[in-house]
Image (cartoon, grey):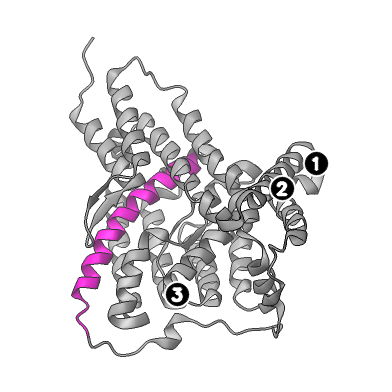
């Protein structure tokens, strides 16, 4: 829950929606996904950065009602893909997404997430960076040396250490504890829906386009998580259930939090780093996230944690772990094979360079662009006959 908290809160703040509804929506999205996938995938679903552009456009065009329409559109697109893979063998997917492509895209996911770390440290400068490094050190020591129950909570221990160190430097905002109540009813998006006067067609088009892009991210995240836990999630619970689960999650976040939803790389890394792949733990984290929407003191405490501690410190470990997982997937790839070498090279270049294909209505960049390019190259480049 802590590993996914920073991005969950950040996306809500960027879009200007209430944190309480955003937390509840993220937890509800994960629970719905957990149910649809029969409790067989430890993926955490939360507020999506990939949907920031359509959410902002929807809010401007028709408020939370337009966001709800967008969430429904996204759900429909995901369900369509889910139905397709109920009738198409997942083995056909591996023909277009070989090991070299999955491993390379996983590396790209981690590296792209690393780009957010300077923003988490923000204007705290060298002090914030040192506190972030102390947090990393605390996580590393507790994970490597601690035994028993303590070894299961390296991120919690590291966060608390970083929090305490940050207090003397005035980085902890204690003003958030003023005039708070124990229980606070979340501000849900559906409470502020109203009749729309503007045309919704441009919003529908945007959501269709961005959902297709997000599906590429969904494939990459589940491939990375499957590689970490040693389970082919494409086959069990299956891509059909995964897509339907993410679609239903988008519908939930749009109604509760006024946002879009996606699988979280932070959650993937937390599973790998903690070596805990229990879906019951993921479910518990989702319930805790929902609880944040009700308990104002907890919201205040988490809001008081400096971003350099969670986003700067914990993220250094989490994001690096994702790329490391991709490297492990690539270790058995034959790079004497020119096809594998070209696919890996192009995916890394397009995924990390920051180039964007498209415009405001539809665009591909980062992981999505790299994945699409890799799939095309894999289909075009035939294996040479020896």
Residue 94 x, y percent position in the rendering: 33, 36
Q: Which mark is residue 146?
A: 1
Residue count near mark 2 (Cα–Cα under 10 Å), binned few <14, some 14–19, many ≥20: many
Outermost residue toward the bottom?
195
Tell me the CA gap for discs 1 and 3: 40 Å
Question: Compared to 52, does 320 lie above or below?
Answer: above
Dominant secondary structure, magenta:
helix
Q: Secondary structure at mark 3?
A: loop
Q: Furthest residue to the top? A: 386
* Occupied quadrant, residue 251: bottom left
Q: Nearer the viewer, mark 1 or mark 3?
A: 3
The residue that appears at 56% across and 81% down in the rendered structure is 186
Residue, disc 2: 154
The x, y position of residue 106, in whole percent, is 43, 39
- State yes or no: residue 199 in magenta: yes
Label 1 environment density (alpha carbons within 10 Å; few <14, some 14–19, many ≥20): some
């Amino acid at each position: 829950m802590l590993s996914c908290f920073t991005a969950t809160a950040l996306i809500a703040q960027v879009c200007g929606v209430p944190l309480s509804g955003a937390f509840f929506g993220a937890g509800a999205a994960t629970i719905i996904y957990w149910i649809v996938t029969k409790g067989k995938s430890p993926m955490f679903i939360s507020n999506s950065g990939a949907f920031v552009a359509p959410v902002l456009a929807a809010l401007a065009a028709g408020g939370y009602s337009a966001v709800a329409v967008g969430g429904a559109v996204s759900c429909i697109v995901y369900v369509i893909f889910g139905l397709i893979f109920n009738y198409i063998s997942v083995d056909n997917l591996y023909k277009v997404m070989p090991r070299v492509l999955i491993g390379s895209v996983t590396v790209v996911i981690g590296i792209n997430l690393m780009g957010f770390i300077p923003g988490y440290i923000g204007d705290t400068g060298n002090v914030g960076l040192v506190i972030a490094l102390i947090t990393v050190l605390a996580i590393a020591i507790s994970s490597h040396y601690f035994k028993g129950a303590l070894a299961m909570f390296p991120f919690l221990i590291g966060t608390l250490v970083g929090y305490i160190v940050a207090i003397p430097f005035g980085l902890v905002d204690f003003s958030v504890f003023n005039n708070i109540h124990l229980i606070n009813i979340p501000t849900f998006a559906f409470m502020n829906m109203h009749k729309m006067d503007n045309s919704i067609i441009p919003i529908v088009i945007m959501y269709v386009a961005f959902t297709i892009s997000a599906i590429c991210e969904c494939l990459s995240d589940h491939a990375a998580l499957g590689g970490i836990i040693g389970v082919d999630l494409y086959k069990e619970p299956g891509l059909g259930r995964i897509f339907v689960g993410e679609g239903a999650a988008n519908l939930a976040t749009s109604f509760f939090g006024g946002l879009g939803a996606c699988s979280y790389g932070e959650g993937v890394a937390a599973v790998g780093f903690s070596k805990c792949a229990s879906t019951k733990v993921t479910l518990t984290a989702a319930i805790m996230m929902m609880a944040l929407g009700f308990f104002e003191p907890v919201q205040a405490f988490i809001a008081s944690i400096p971003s350099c501690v969670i986003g700067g410190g914990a993220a250094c470990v989490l994001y690096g772990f994702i790329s490391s997982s991709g490297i492990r997937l690539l270790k058995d790839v034959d790079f004497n094979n020119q096809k594998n070498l070209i696919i890996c090279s192009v995916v890394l270049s397009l995924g990390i360079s920051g180039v964007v294909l498209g415009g405001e209505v539809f665009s591909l960049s980062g992981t999505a662009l790299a994945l699409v390019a890799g799939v095309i190259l894999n289909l075009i480049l035939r294996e040479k006959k020896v």
